[in-house]
Image: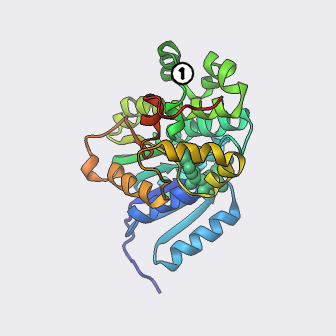
Amino acid sequence: MIFNRNNKKQVVALLGAGSMGTAIVRRIAASKKILLGDISEKALERVSADFKRSGYDVETCVVNALEKKSVVAFAKKAADLGPVMYFIDTAGASPNQASPEHIVNLDMVGTGYAVDAFGEVIAEGGAGLIISSQAAYMYPIPNEDELQIVNASTDELTDLPIVKNVAMQNSGFAYMIAKRVNHLQAQRAAATSWGERRARINTISPGIIVTPLAYDEFNANGEGYQAMIDASAARRVASSDEIADAAAFLLGEHASFITGTDLLIDGGVIASIRTGQFKLQG
Ligand SMILES: NC(=O)c1ccc[n+]([C@@H]2O[C@H](COP(=O)([O-])OP(=O)(O)OC[C@H]3O[C@@H](n4cnc5c(N)ncnc54)[C@H](O)[C@@H]3O)[C@@H](O)[C@H]2O)c1
């Protein structure tokens, strides 16, 4: 059966076909062409079969977000499929899954490669979204370091003092700094490459969202996470679908005046930290 014969479909490209990414795509991609990118061939097979069963038009591409060449090829493949209207980047690893080097290279530098590559192909009126984290709000980076980050190219990021001297100390620092850098990468792109193409780009900083990645964190530090949940205003975790709701808004036309900004969706965790209701360990 051919469900949709329209051959001028807009393209939705997703880097990181995991839990949050696929929930977002499902929300926005009806009638569009979906390009799923992930390092895991198995994940791509499973997720694309799922989408196809629901009538979506899907293609897949094995891509390693750690490699600039691979990310550039992914962006080119997206552009070859049609006008790239949406790009979502959720490829990431959390503190209990990886070394500081891996987190810096994936969550920070890999995201930079993707923002740069899609900044070359995003269509006029298109929109991008990077999934950052509430962790971005947990380590205040001094202003002078933020200025260096904003002015650095992606290839220069790992040479910056904040990355070499602080992020590389442990996976927790690496994650908090990488996720804050994501906000600055979106700001920079919104004002330059993406803005020049009349495209928007924003970040979402989720709190605790129940996904396989979150289970790795719970298994390593269940008590800490429970205390964080108990101290938050919402007193609960959230699902990927709740992030997808906000993502659909930020990617959609009702958000056409919103670019270069971050939306924190954390059930009040950061508010509880900022007001001293909850104290981060370590
Ligand atoms: N789940 C949470 O509680 C939470 C909270 C805040 C932020 N985040 C962030 O949200 C994003 C998505 O996380 P999720 O919870 O949906 O996790 P997930 O594990 O379901 O998805 C991550 C995907 O990234 C892919 N990936 C990993 N390394 C890659 C690489 N080198 N190249 C290409 N793809 C790669 C994985 O195969 C996986 O499919 C991550 O950046 C994570 O840091 C998650």
State whether label 1 is within 8 Å of ligand 1.
no
Q: Residues within 10 Å of mark 1 (few under 14, many from 20)?
A: some
Asked if residue 255 lies left or right of residue 45, the reply is left
Secondary structure, mark 1, is: loop
- Residue 9 visible (yes or no): yes
**Image coordinates for residue 240, horizontal then vertical, percent:** 49, 58
**Image coordinates for residue 23, horizontal then vertical, percent:** 48, 62
Q: Where does the C terminus fall, quadrant-wise? A: top right
**Image coordinates for residue 270, horizontal then vertical, percent:** 46, 36
**Image coordinates for residue 4, horizontal then vertical, percent:** 39, 77
Q: Residue at x 71, y 26 (%)?
A: 168
Name which quarter of the figure residue 179 lies in: top right
What is the count of numbered marks? 1
Q: Nearer the viewer, residue 132 or 138?
A: 138
The residue where tag 1 is placed is 152
- Residue 63 visible (yes or no): no
Q: Residue at x 47, y 77 (%)?
A: 54
Q: Residue at x 46, y 73 (%)?
A: 56
Q: What amino acid is found at the position of numbered circle 1 in the picture?
A: Ala
Name which quarter of the figure residue 274 lies in: top left
Which residue in the rendered view is the most extreme toward the top?
144
Q: Nearer the viewer, residue 269 or 18?
A: 269
Residue 243 in the image: above or below residue 139? below
